[in-house]
Image: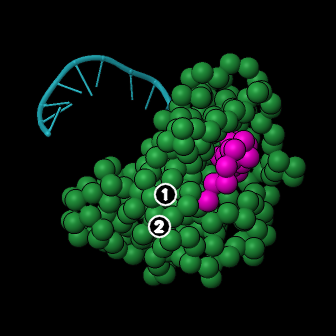
Chain colours: A green, B red, C cyan
DNA sequence: GCGACAG
DNA sequence: ATCTTGTCGC
């Protein structure tokens, strides 16, 4: 199966237009739902890798069984870069490929875990919020770096947290997922509370600092990029622990 | 005004 | 994100 990854209609071509789109879509963000409880249903990781030299982008979506963390299904999408990296506008660079990969999945994604931020964002509309509004799915953001936000180092034990603040407001949380190891930075996306987002992040880190969803998606999109041949391709497979 | 800044 | 070898440790 091979198709071209589409750039969505109306995808902004300038930074000013992209910021305007964020302001518009922010009104549709749902923040009063708790979200699915950890350990139930599906949890899907999404991630993107780049080859600037070949102007290629590859996205992966990996669906895990939330109870066992076994792989249920996975999909990849390869296409052309749709937007440059601009701090605060990451979603416009990553989402076209991510949306294509999600649509290629043979099963419902359930909760989606993004590699980046949700509400912790200059305009409170990061990658995870954006993906949630476009798909209607519950989303959370788990980032590896504190971006431009301030926080106090959480206590050493796994599970310790500290507020991630922007102008004194708690926009996310620094969460220690492994004893004594650098924390990850969690924020709510769409239809999920910050408390629940952190609970999911903990449930997804039984062995490593980063969530299993992120680790699986990262490995898969890198592989898809290496194996990328033609102009654009989307592929999906179901199985994993389900066979 | 000039950087720094998720990936 | 990506450029990049070896190396220490379980």
Q: Quadrant of the N terminus of chain A?
A: top right
Front-most of A209 and A185?
A209
Q: Quadrant of the C terminus of chain A?
A: top right
Front-most of A202 and A160?
A202
Do the numbered discs 1 and 2 sit on residues whose CB atoms are within 8 Å?
yes
Taking the spot 63% from the left edge, 66% from the top edge, the residue there is A138
Q: Find the magenta span and give its range.
A: A92-110
Taking the spot 56% from the left edge, 52% from the top edge, the residue there is A44
Does A232 sit left or right of A180 as displayed?
right
Is residue A179 shown above or below A69?
below
Q: Picture quarter containing residue A162?
A: bottom left
- Residue A121 in percent (x, y) is at 57, 66
- Residue A108 in percent (x, y) is at 67, 54
Taking the spot 22% from the left edge, 66% from the top edge, the residue there is A157
Q: Picture quarter containing residue A28?
A: bottom right
- Answer few, some or many: residues within 10 Å of disc 1's Cα (few below 14, many 20 plus, some between 14 and 19): many
Q: Which residue is mark 1?
A: A66
**Chain of the residue on which disc 2 is drawn:** A
Q: Which residue is mark 2?
A: A38
Q: Picture quarter containing residue A153?
A: bottom left
Does A152 sit left or right of A212 as displayed?
left
């Amino acid at each position: 199966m091979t198709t071209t990854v589409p750039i969505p209609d109306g995808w902004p071509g300038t930074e000013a237009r992209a910021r305007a789109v964020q302001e518009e879509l922010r009104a549709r963000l749902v923040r009063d739902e708790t979200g699915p409880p950890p350990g139930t249903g599906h949890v899907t990781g999404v991630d993107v890798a780049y080859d600037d030299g070949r102007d290629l982008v590859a996205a992966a979506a990996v669906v895990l069984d939330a109870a066992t963390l076994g792989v249920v299904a996975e999909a990849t999408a390869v296409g052309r870069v749709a937007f440059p990296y601009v701090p605060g506008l990451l979603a416009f660079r990553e989402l076209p490929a991510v949306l294509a990969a999600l649509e290629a999945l043979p099963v419902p994604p359930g909760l989606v875990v993004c590699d980046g931020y949700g509400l912790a964002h200059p305009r409170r509309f990061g990658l995870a919020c954006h993906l949630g509004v476009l798909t209607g799915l519950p989303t959370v953001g788990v980032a590896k770096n504190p971006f431009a936000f301030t926080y106090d180092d959480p206590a050493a034990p796994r599970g310790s947290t500290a507020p991630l603040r922007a102008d004194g407001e708690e926009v996310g949380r620094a969460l220690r997922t492994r004893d004594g190891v650098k924390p990850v930075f969690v924020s709510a996306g769409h239809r999920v509370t910050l408390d629940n987002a952190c609970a999911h992040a903990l449930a997804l880190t039984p062995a490593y600092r980063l969530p299993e969803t992120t680790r699986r998606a990262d490995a898969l999109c890198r592989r898809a990029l290496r194996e990328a041949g033609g102009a654009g391709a989307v592929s999906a497979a179901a199985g994993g622990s389900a066979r």
